[in-house]
Amino acid sequence: MRLIISFLLFFVLNVSFSQQNKELTEQEYLLLQDKIRLNLNADRDSATVYANKMAKSGNYKHKAFANVAQAYLLQLKDNTAKSKEKYEQAFQYLEKMPESKDKDQLKAYLYNYGGLIEGARGNYSKALENYQTGMKISTNIGDVIQIVKFKSNIAFINEAIGNYQLAIKNLKQLNVFIDNNESYFTKEQFNTVKSSNNLTLAASYEGWYMKNQSSTKLLDSAAFFYKKTVSYSQNLPINNIKAKISLGNVYYMKNDYTNAEKTYYNIVFYAKQNNLKREYKIANYNLGNLYFETKKYDKALVFFKKVDSVSEIDNLRDESFLKSNYYQAKIYNIYKEPQEAFKHSKIYLDNYEKSEAKLNNEALEVNYKLGTGDLSDEMVTIQKKYENDVLLNKALKVFYVLLVVGIVFLLIKNIRDKNKAHKKMNALIEEFKANIEKKNNAENEVIEQNEAEVFENEEVHFKKENMPLSIDEAKENKIVEKLLALESKQEFLNADFTLSYVAKKIKTNTTYLSYVVNKRFGKSFGEYSNELKINYVINEMITNHMYRKYSTQAIAESVGFKNAVSFAKSFRKRTGVSPAQFASNI
């Protein structure tokens, strides 16, 4: 009985194991392969299910392809360690296959996926190595479809690092080649290749425009190829949404903000519904950027913060996250919120230098491995740019820190100065109100009684011949009395109340007058004159509510200033605030 039970148990386990490792038919393998490729970007969860199903096959070829597809899908989820493990396993299964054209073709596939994986990591030079190795294999076995894929992916690398003209040239040639060899492709393959090529071609025109914004024809070309991408992408949601995002960008660059805004909102909704996080972030960033440029800063912050929120969840510091923080720092700087401005500028600077340096290094490596003569000048330019950018980025980092610190300092100083100015202004108002009540005309009457005698003595003095130039206390007193008399008559309100005018008016000379004013009042004649005018304005503002309503220019003219600027400067020096601020605080 035990023997029978053991046999049955062995049989069940054997059947179960054999089912798990059932070898797929060639037709089943090719069908799963197409499903994986179709869903790699559109529905990654479905692609993972198909790859896992293929991996259960007992055929080494099937396992190799399944593992390389899993490696790419894992890298798209930023699981680099597991991705590397799966990629190595794919080659281990490949080596177990007997030598054949089938094995060579699969090896080319593995190198193509290797390029995609390195590209997803931002390692463009390593991606190019994989593409070039794989293309040699495909060329040797005459695999036209795979050669097209390699050429298309190499063009994408050129577009990614800024070799736009070379990418455009190669992709246009490739499009013609594909059209002439359409019979090699299934309908789905043809649409996929044409969609990807036109998307990269459009992006290359757009990137070229960003470097040469005087040529708007480049934008028209970009829009043309984005629309062609959409026409070939009915079954390729990722390419479809990428093309539409970029069409929105073209609207934006043409200042057609209405269509740009509408396009971005549609993409946000579509991406959220289909769980396309990267595209969701890009569309939100684009809306934030649009509102920033149209000075709708509150709206811009809403969308930039959405970008940050998704980035924090994914722990991914990509280009959208970087630029989002750049604009948030600018907005908070405009809003004079130094802490927020500092926080976001620090995030931007901490990530910018690293990403920019990596991109420049990758560009140098890719151009070196391409070995194209027409890129030699560009390679030198990029090299110089890289060397200068490192220093520039460090300088920018210091500059932004100093800028933020400076903003904070100025804000604090401004608050303190305002408080100080208000205290000074209030003290002046109280002082003038008190003086108004005590003021009387006694001083004016004394001056008028003595004026005739002073004038007479002054005339006698100047008629004397050969009298030495000197001035005594009595003479000083007379000059002061005459000045006070002019003050009481408000002569200082005249525009010609100058040193020479007053000296002539009180029958003395400019040297004596300047000396007496400086000695008795402790200031130059110009300062003395300006103070009389400003004191008059302060007094009028306090006592005459209509006077407060005058414009700065009108007030300046009323006290003999030639222009409002010099008057406002003198007024602020005396009171600490502008005339308008003073009037509003009475």
Image (tube, rainbow, N blue to C red):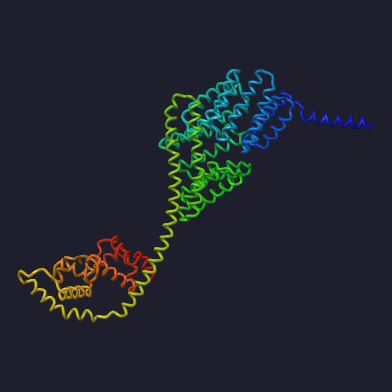
Q: How many marks?
A: 0
Q: What residue lies at 44% left-to-right and 36% top-to-bottom?
A: 387
227 vs 89, left or right, is left
- Can residue 558 be spotted in the picture? no
Q: Whole-percent x and y of residue 116? A: 59, 31
Q: Quadrant of residue 128?
A: top right
| Residue farthest right in this picture | 1
Q: Whole-percent x and y of residue 169? A: 48, 26
In which quadrant of the rendered image does the N terminus lie? top right
Q: Whole-percent x and y of residue 352? A: 50, 42
Q: Quadrant of residue 66?
A: top right
Q: Nearer the viewer, residue 283 or 190?
A: 283
464 vs 170, left or right, is left
In the displayed structure, would residue 228 be above or below residue 294?
above
In the displayed structure, would residue 63 be above or below residue 318?
above
In the displayed structure, would residue 328 be above or below residue 214?
below
Q: What residue lies at 69% left-to-right and 25% top-to-bottom?
A: 93
In the displayed structure, would residue 200 be above or below residue 253?
above
546 vs 68, left or right, is left
Q: Whole-percent x and y of residue 46? A: 68, 36
Q: What residue lies at 36% left-to-right and 69% top-to-bottom?
A: 425
In which quadrant of the rendered image does the C terminus lie? bottom left
- Can residue 173 be spotted in the picture? yes
